[in-house]
């Protein structure tokens, strides 16, 4: 991780944010986290909507984001993903955040709010799909889907490399939900990508592993349905 000199302004904002979090405690959110088995060192259960509205009060600030992340509260970590500056995020930071995360909620937040806007998004998504840890692989698949719907000018060919790294991941039941979602997002991207996704699911259906055949059939059924094909971008 990079070393940045602290400054009084960032420290003052950091203290104000930390003090404002406990009053945002939400019993419904806290109960939902418990039911889903999502754990943090400390969590007040503030809703994502409340955190988004709160974050709008502040300008993006890379140093502030790093300080919030290092606090290790659920709410400060989520706010870090909302307040960081994508252009200042490094590959080392992305790896550190992903590899030290302990649940899918924070992975979802960092991918959605921050990582897809960084210059390293495609590189890290592919790299994480090849990772060994479950949550690292989860992050890679999630990033693939988020990038496919991001409002950028990325060409379809940039997504073709993912088809080489996905087959082993299809054998892991724990990744089926995020794989299903991300494949559907990619299949809606264009007619070309839809065709490649259909071909990929056909390959999964022929896989020797039952888990891969199962998710292949599920995705194939959805992306070849009439209602889905109407959603494909021209």
Image (cartoon, rainbow, N blue to C red):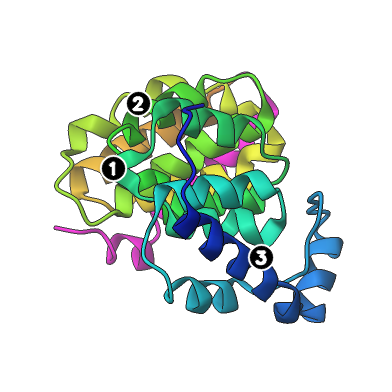
Judge from the rendering whether residue 126 lies leftward or rightward of residue 23; answer left or right: left
Q: Which residue is mark 1?
A: 87
Q: Is residue 134 above or below residue 228?
A: above
Residue 232 among magenta residues? yes
Residue drawn at x 73%, y 40% as measured from the top left: 102
Q: Earlier in the sequence, mark 2 or mark 3?
A: 3
Q: Residues within 10 Å of mark 2 (few under 14, many from 20)?
A: few
Judge from the rendering whether residue 161 lies leftward or rightward of residue 115; answer left or right: left
Residue 212: where, in percent of width, then height? 61, 30
Residue 165: where, in percent of width, then height? 45, 21
Q: Which residue is mark 3?
A: 18
Q: CA distance from mark 2 to mark 3?
A: 33 Å
Residue drawn at x 73%, y 81% as measured from the top left: 23
Place residue 170 in its image quadrant: top right
Q: Earlier in the sequence, mark 1 or mark 2?
A: 1
Residue drawn at x 52%, y 64% as measured from the top left: 13
């Amino acid at each position: 991780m990079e070393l940045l000199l602290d400054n009084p302004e960032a420290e003052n904002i950091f203290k104000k944010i930390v003090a404002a979090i406990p009053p945002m405690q939400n019993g419904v959110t806290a109960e939902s986290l418990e039911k889903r088995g999502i754990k943090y060192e400390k969590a007040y259960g503030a809703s994502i909507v409340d955190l988004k509205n709160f974050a709008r009060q502040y300008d993006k600030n890379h140093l502030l984001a790093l300080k919030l992340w290092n606090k290790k509260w659920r709410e400060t970590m989520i706010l870090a993903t909302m307040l960081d500056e994508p252009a200042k995020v490094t590959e080392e930071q992305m790896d550190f955040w992903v590899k030290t995360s302990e649940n899918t909620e924070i992975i979802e937040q960092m991918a959605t709010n921050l990582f897809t806007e960084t210059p390293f998004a495609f590189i890290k998504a592919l790299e994480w799909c090849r990772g060994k840890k479950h949550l690292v692989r989860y992050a890679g698949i999630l990033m693939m889907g988020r990038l496919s719907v991001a409002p950028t000018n990325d060409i379809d060919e940039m997504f073709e490399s993912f088809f080489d790294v996905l087959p082993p991941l299809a054998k892991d039941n724990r990744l089926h939900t995020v794989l299903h979602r991300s494949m559907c997002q990619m299949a809606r991207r264009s007619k070309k990508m839809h065709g490649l996704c259909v071909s990929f699911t056909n390959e999964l259906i022929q896989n020797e592993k039952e888990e891969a055949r199962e998710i292949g059939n599920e995705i194939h059924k959805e992306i070849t349905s009439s209602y889905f094909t109407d959603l494909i971008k021209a």
